[in-house]
Image: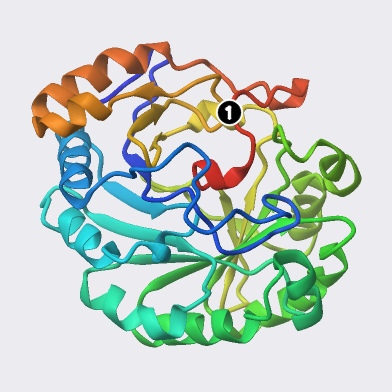
Amino acid sequence: MLQDSFGRRFYYLRLSVTDICNFRCNYCLPDGIGCGRSLEGENPLSVAEVSTVVRAFAELGTEKVRLTGGEPSLRRDLLDMMHAVRDCDSIRRLAITTNGYRLPAQIDDWHSAGLDQLNVSVDSLDPAQFHKITGHDRLDKALAGIDRALELGIATKVNAVLLREHNLSEFERFLGWIRETPVTLRFIELMRTGDNREFFASNHVSGSDIETLLVRDGWQQVIRTRDAGPAREYYHPDYAGRIGLITPYGKDFCASCNRLRISAQGKLHLCLFAEQGFDLREVIADGDHVALADHIRELIHGKAAAHDLHEGFTGATRNLAMLGG
């Protein structure tokens, strides 16, 4: 089992397959990214390299793999990557995070490839506000894709970044939506990165304020599974859906960390906000997953106790598209 110096065990790998995104979200990439350009250079991991990475982490006890970006659906060989993850028997759960741009056209194929869990970014339920935040008129596509995922029995979560000036006023509208829609709606605190300092200052909302409202209104916390993400989830008997809160500025947020990240170029990031990634590309390219696992086991002891976001630390993270958040 992969364990760091603080006794934390890591059951969950977030594997970026591209750092290109076709959205222009105002909190992440407001100016977009040029077609064919990546934030860390070209040459993302191949399907064979993804397979080596997954087998190495499986050797270390990882049970859940999430494919992220950027926007992972931009990879033409995404289905092959899904099959590569599914070919590793000890990986119990395959998840993906997407902006939902072409979700209705893709979700059936993803389901056939073995997708267990879908996360879709929907920062507003108002079409005009959705366009203002993302730069795209695709809310209807994202919602249609979510409906289809639920029909297929895929566990579905919806991510909404809390933004004081853009979607905080929609809180009651979001609640009305999940009264009948069986998704987990996760409100995520806006995180400060190297590129969004001014935007952060005017838009950050504390998730603890939302949590106080939920508890007051009878929402009860769900017991976490060991491969769960960072959200504290709540349920209410009057609602079909659940609410999750991701509060990276909260006390002891890092104490329950159970996940590691591999970038699209094969760097191991011990934290989303670490100063650097450890370049594993040469070891990955050799195809020896046991040797790769041994190397990762050595590096894990360098993981810090906390990310220190509350002190204004952002590390090397220029924007969230680099590693999929």
Report x, y in % for residue 22. Answer: 56, 63
Q: Is residue 150 visible?
A: no
Res 164 quadrant in image:
bottom right
Q: Is residue 308 above or below residue 171?
A: above
Q: Can residue 49 be seen in this view?
A: yes
Between residue 137 and residue 91, name the one nearer to us. Answer: 137
Q: What colour-coding does the image apply?
A: rainbow
Q: Is residue 181 above or below residue 242?
A: below
Q: Residues within 10 Å of mark 1 (few under 14, many from 20)?
A: many
Report x, y in % for residue 205. Answer: 83, 48
- Quadrant containing the N terminus in the rendered view: top left
What residue is shown with label 1? 273
Q: Is mark 1 on a helix, strand or loop?
A: loop
- Quadrant containing the C terminus in the rendered view: top right
Instruction: Give me the residue at 40% from left, 85% from top.
Output: 105
In the rendered structure, the answer to whether residue 159 lies left or right of residue 278 reads right
